[in-house]
Structure formats: C-alpha cells, structure tokens
Image (cartoon, grey):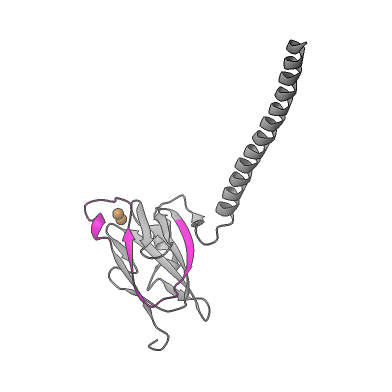
Amino acid sequence: MSTEHTDRFDAAFHDIAVRHERNWMFIAVTMIALLFIAAVFLVVHDYGVVAKTSAIYSDPNTPSTLADFQGSGVRQTGPDSYSVYEIGRAWSWTPGTATPLQLPVGARVTFYVTSGDVLHGFEIQGTSINLTAIPGVVGHVSYTFDKPGTYYIICNEYCGAGHQAMIGKIVITGRAQA
Ligand code: CUA
C-alpha cells in the first residue's frame, strides 16, 4: 500500500515538474526569439546608428570622380541640413585634413563616405559616426551636431605607415558667431 502511495505521489510530482519545465522552456525560447527580433529590427531600422550604403560601383575609382566629391565636398541641402562628400586617402580626409570643415551648430549632416585607395575607418570622435570607407562604395550616415566645438575625424582601420596621422577636423560654430 505504502509503495503504491509513493508511486502515485512520484507520478503526480513528475507530471507537475514536466509542466513547469515545459512552461519555463517556452518562456526562455520566447525571450530569446523576442531579443533576436528586436536586434534585427534595430539594425534594419537604422535609427542613425548603422551606416547605410548609397551606391556600389564596379570600378573602385568611380566615386572619387563623381561631381559631388569635387570642390569643397559640402552642399547645403536645407536651412539646417548639409551633405558632406568625404573621400579617405592614405593618409588624409577630404574635406577635413587640408581644409577643416566648418558647419553651424544644429546642422543635420549626412556624410557620404568613400575611399580613393584602400580601406579606411571613418570615425568622428565624440559622436556615433563610425563607418568603413571602401573603394567603389559610398556609405552614408546622418548626424546632428548639437554642441559647438572642434570634432576630429580619425581613421580607425589600419591603412599604412601614416594611419595614425590620418586626422581631419570639423569645426562646429555657435549660432551667434555664425
Ligand atoms: Cu586610413 Cu587608417
């Protein structure tokens, strides 16, 4: 009798344990799935954090010959918005290194970035801007400069002997002085 009682208790306990385990497995798998979907959603929907590709050319030299990349490389596209066409070359940023970029505070700037030779890393310190400059590819990223000051464009991908000196300058001027 006592043995049968124990068996019944064991069976009931087993059933409950199985139910609990199934529930918790379901909760854990659901959480993983939700996290995965959220991560994909964030990447796909950008939010200005992820750089996007504007164009890919079969000839890696094409972007540097495009009209937008000639001259100052800066186009005003609205009252507070600008496009900046940036070429990385060993070992300078154009515009930025020879001629510092000057933009007013509050400017919404879209950077179109390419490379004229090898891979470079386009990073603007103190901002979320960080994308790879690739020959034949134009990537873009937008950013609003809310604070006046000097920002430095650095190269964060090793590109040869002058890599550490591949620095450009962006001067964000206050509205009063602009
Ligand atoms: Cu360009 Cu490192």
Segment tinted magenta in the rendering: 138-166
Where residue 99 appears, as percent x and y from the top left, is 30, 73
Left or right, 18 with reference to 96: right
Comparing 36 with 139, the one in front is 36
Position of 159 relative to 142 (above/below): above
Where residue 111 appears, as percent x and y from the top left, is 45, 65
Look at 48% across and 62% down and name the residue there: 141
Quadrant occupied by the C terminus:
bottom left
Q: Residue furthest left?
A: 161
Look at 27% across and 59% down and name the residue there: 91
Report the image quarter containing ligand 1. Answer: bottom left
Left or right, 43 with reference to 14: left
Look at 72% across and 28% down and name the residue there: 16
In this rendering, the count of numbered labels is 0
Q: Is 145 colored magenta in this rendering?
A: yes
Left or right, 79 with reference to 128: right
Position of 81 relative to 44 (above/below): below
Residue 154 sits in quarter: bottom left
Where residue 125 appears, as percent x and y from the top left, is 35, 64
Quadrant occupied by the N terminus:
top right
Where residue 152 appears, as percent x and y from the top left, is 32, 67
Q: Is 56 colored magenta in this rendering?
A: no
Look at 40% across and 62% down and name the residue there: 65
Residue 4 sits in quarter: top right
